[in-house]
Amino acid sequence: MEALTTKNNAIVIREGQALTPDLLNSFSAYIDASPKTVQTYLIAVRQFYKWMGAHGITHPTREDILAFRDELKAGHKPTTVQNYIIALRVFYRYLEQEYGYENVAEHIKGARISKEHKKSYLTSAQIKNVMKGMERGTEQGRRDYAIFALMVTGGLRDIEVHRANIEDLSTLGDCTVLFLQGKYQDERAVYVKVPAEVEKAIRDSLADRKDTDGKQPLFISLSNNSKGERISTRSISGLVKDNLKRAGYNSERFTAHSLRHTAVTLALLGGISLQEVQQFARHSNIATTLIYAHNLDRAKNNCGHTIASAIFE
């Protein structure tokens, strides 16, 4: 393998050496992104170096990057392939800028990603069915119900639920709102309105807790290993999935993110304008909101029904 280090400001290339911690630390600082993104990029780079080692490659070329991408396509989802190639493009741009190394990943494309939603939304009747069957007689049941209700009425992502603090629940005008620290955001700059029914569910959950200082998490873990700590995104996804399964919606297309899809879809079906739904969903680009609208237009397409009527009696 080949690694780059500096000695007296000169480039030193050593054959047979894996990625050095100094190089990875320097690359991490160069990325200037969220910890999750940095971790994803480091995993991708390590995976590529491992792949090079398996193929006896010490001086990678553009063709090697393309071959790596093609092998990824055979066993990984398009989003994974895309993330890995983006990481390699950034990595080799870093090597080019810092060490004058040839950028062999420049302009290499990742994978074609469909704009169709990978997760399904639920109808209003299905959501009612799930919530009607949720346990509310226990502390965990009240917490889970409050999280579910908040996510499906506010279109919240699991990371937004995870980051929410008690003090983020506030009053604005005549409404109760929840300020959010969303994806890629450092501040709680946006908010969602909290319906009265959802606020009551949240207050009922908070009533079970002893420590309700404003800086405390809005929702906490109740498991033995992390009791009282901020609930994790994994736990949020798990409790939503469990309740969906108990209601009979056991499909890989139904996940915690389906609640966000459901919120946006029901808003559009209810006649809310695209601009209002864009603001509600915190979409930075209205093109994202339009995907939902286009999917609804396709759902209204009755071509299949018309064809079946012509064929079957």
Image: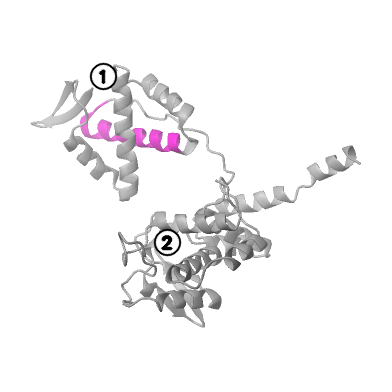
Give the labeled residue for mark 2. Answer: 160
Dividing the picture into quadrants, the one containing residue 226 is bottom left
Q: Height in image: 179 above or below 78?
A: below
Question: Helix, strand or loop at disc 2?
Answer: helix
Residue range (magenta): 80-101
Residue 195, located in which quarter of the rendered image?
bottom right
Residue at coordinates 44% horizontally, 34% vertically from top-left? 81
Q: Find residue 53 and report its horizontal and vertical position in percent.
A: 28, 21
Residue 89 appears in view: yes
The residue positioned 84% from the left and 41% from the top of the image is 308
> In which quadrant of the rendered image does the C terminus lie?
top right
Is 127 placed above or below 81 here?
below
**Label 2 Cα neighbours within 10 Å, binned few <14 / some 14-19 / many ≥20:** some
Extreme residue in the bottom direction: 174
96 lies left or right of 281: left
Queried whether the magenta region covers residue 87, the answer comes back as yes
Foreground: 290 or 114?
114
Distance of mark 2 from mark 1, alpha carbons? Answer: 43 Å
Determine crowd level at label 1: few under 14, some 14-19, many 20+ residues with C-alpha closer than 10 A: some
Where residue 11 sits: x, y (%)?
15, 27
Q: Give the amino acid type for the residue marked by disc 1 in the picture.
A: Thr
Q: Indicate the position of residue 233 as horizontal and vertical percent values.
A: 40, 56
- Please identify the quadrant where the N terminus is shown: top left
Residue at the image point whose x is 49% and y is 33% from the top: 111
Secondary element under disc 1, as helix, strand or loop, is loop
| Residue 58 disc label | 1
